[in-house]
Image (cartoon, rainbow, N blue to C red):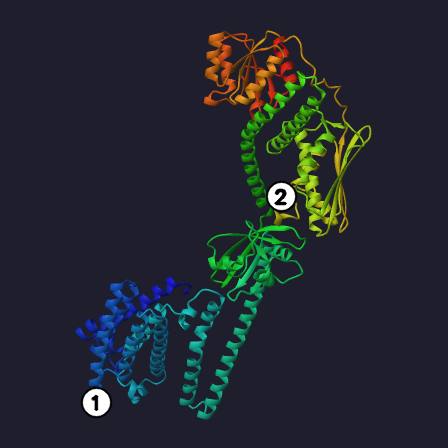
Amino acid sequence: MLTSRVDTHRASAICAAVVVATALVVLVVGWGFDVSLVVRLYPNFPAMVPGTAIALLLLGVAHLMALRGDHDSVRAARVLYVGAFGFTLVKLALHFEQHARLPESADRMAFATLIGLLLVVASGLCTTARRSLPERYGALIATTGILLCTVALVLYLYDPASVASIAIFLGLAIPTAVSLLLLFVAILLSSPTDNWLATLTAQGPAAESARSMLPLALSGPIFLCYLALLSTDVGLITPTLRLGTLAVLLSALAIAGVVRNARFYDEARRRGAAEQARLSRTFDGLSAAVFVVDSEGAVVMTNKAARQLVGNDATPEDWLQSAAFHSLDDRSPMEGAFHPVRQILAARGGHDLYAGWFGPGGAERALRFSAMDLPEDRVTLIVVSDETQSWMLQETLNRTERLDAIGQLSGGISHELANILGVIRLTSDTAVLGNDMTAMRTQLEAIRKACDRGADLMDRLLHLSREPTYTDTLVDVTEITRSALLLARGSMLERTDLVAKLDAIPELYVAVPGADLQSAVLNLLLNARNAVEASDRPGRVEVEMTADADEVTIRVSDTGIGMSDDVQRKAREPFFTTRRAYGGSGLGLSMVDSLARRTGGRLDIQSVPGKGTVIEMVLPRATGPGPQADEDTMIDGLHGISVLLVEDDRSFADAVTNALELFGVVPLLAHDAAQAMQVMEDHGAPDILLTDIGLPGGVFGDVLAVEAVARYPGLRVIYMSGNPSLLHRSDRDVPGLRLKKPIHPTGLANAIRLTMSGSAGGH
């Protein structure tokens, strides 16, 4: 059974080789050695004349050359076809002259042979043209030749003597008719176009059914006609009865073929439906949405995930063609040629494509589109995967990387700002400590408070951009909330009133990292602002604190759009957001909820759609610290202590020097590590090395401390920096107190006193 193109190519070559072998045997054995049986097959039958054998030999070799497929072989085949054509035309011109003078029993090239040879040449030339239109003509010509040869062979089967009475078949030998038939079959088998013989030799149930019916379709009518003719000749039936019986039998044979064909198609449809059901069950097991699209773009099958993705508001076909997709980068609409389905179909599996889409619940989803062609089924699989979680993780990673870069940049900026604020603060503090004029103290106090506000704001921003250090340090909830309000107030719209009720209960303390608490309150404020903004009407955001003996409650309420029950259930989930199109990450409330639960508290959400939302963060209350020392108290007992100050900012160095002199300390000054080592060499070792960590020249304060202590054992060290990431390192080789810029004179004096008392190591 022929089931593939490779099999038909081999069969075509075999047919042509048989023709070549037959022609050679007839020429060499039949005519060369005068073996009549070879050239006639039966006594008194017409013989294959040498001219016919030569022509068949040329055509057989030409077809074998054409089957090789390379350019030179195809060109040689065409030359042989043209040569055979010329030879046949010459024989055709001589045919009529010979036909008139040759007796009827003489061997000759039949007129049917000449027609058959010309048909072989024409169909062979059309097939080697490698163009669709000539190839179709070639298949038609070859089919005509097959019919001609089949008629001649059937005549030989029914009444061999009657062949000579038909002018067109006079002189046609059985080997000639069979050879011509084989050449026509070989040409049809080698044709790249879909002809009837290619359909019979193809794969698939339809071709198998056709092949199974072919023997009966060919032999049935021939056998019935032969039986009817034989019955008439022996007198069993009359010619009229023969015709009637033959008509009935042929009709019955045709009906049997039609019924069998109908059964086959019913079975094929049943198998197709079963296969489609099996395929549908397989697709339903996939998590990705699958759309099977035909060549016209119509959806012929979907799986369960696709139907769930589309929902009930649209058909799968309408969703693929008309859904509003947008770019995940800039949220621009993907329309026209940029529509994801059109792009993926145009690429035909070249790459995957990502697009955003707002689902039935209003949440943005990141979808990945991919396509795969199935040429045998003439359909395309469009696979749509929901990549929202992985996309959000990637977005969060990108934001984290950007935030990390901002944090690293902010460290250097904070150092410079700390120096500027430190100059102002130290100068004003020194003036306050050394001046009793009430009016002057009021003005200096205002300067100090402004510096404190600037330093606190800078510190809060730094905490937001770096990973916090988890400690049990107590923080004042009121102060933290005020700082969050200060950061959030500038982002409020003009139509949004921000109201704070924080004065009722002072000094509320919780054991929570200050940066985390500030971030949590800021998240609640910004969420409330977004809710009011989405309502498109003037609104109000209110912050209130309540407390009892065990708990502190921070309540943030708004008059915004509120949340549905479904959104409230998902609000605490990481990465869930209804503001994906506006850059929301879905991490805000999740982080607030995590902070509350980590400290033993909770997060409560109450909301009414269209009315607003109330969110309460409840935290365990802690006992506050004891009374704080007065900043303006002079510290005694520092007279005569020598301190080497190493600071690259000259203005800040001057301010620190003035403060040290106020307390009776003997200051020495250097602006980098090399100058500091030279000062110690010139003046001897000081009592304390007070050094900035971020020094110029490539030698930081940590390295300077190691070199100085190695040369002068017993030297005490105090470190200063406005960059928290540098200040709070725990791997220093030389321990020492750490002062965060901007520093207060009293804090500096206390650090010197503690260091001299020997109890400051590593604090």
Q: Nearer the viewer, residue 69 or 762?
A: 762
Extreme residue toward the right, this view:
548
Q: Which residue is mark 1?
A: 103
Q: Secondary structure at mark 2?
A: loop
Q: Is residue 150 left or right of residue 476?
A: left
Q: Secondary structure at mark 1?
A: loop
Q: Which image quadrant for residue 506?
A: top right
Q: Which image quadrant for residue 463?
A: top right
The picture places residue 480, in percent across and down from the top left corner, at: 70, 31
Q: Is residue 176 left or right of residue 477?
A: left
The quarter of the rendered structure image containing the C terminus is top right
Label 1 Cα crowd, 10 Å radius (few <14 / some 14-19 / many 20+): few
Asked if 715 appears above or below 207 in the picture, the reply is: above
Which residue is found at the position 50% from the left and 58% from the top? 343
Amino acid, disc 2:
Ser
State the count of labels: 2
The picture places residue 65, in percent across and down from the top left corner, at: 26, 66
The picture places residue 423, in percent across and down from the top left corner, at: 59, 23
Q: Which residue is mark 2?
A: 585
Asked if 669 appears above or below 224 in the picture, the reply is: above
Which residue is found at the position 66% from the left and 37% from the top? 487
Of the two numbered discs 1 and 2 on the same chain, state the one appearing first in sequence.
1
Which residue is found at the position 60% from the left and 33% from the top? 465
Q: Which mark is residue 726?
A: none
Whole-Å distance between the Cαs marked 1 and 2? 103 Å
The quarter of the rendered structure image containing the N terminus is bottom left
Amino acid, disc 1:
Pro
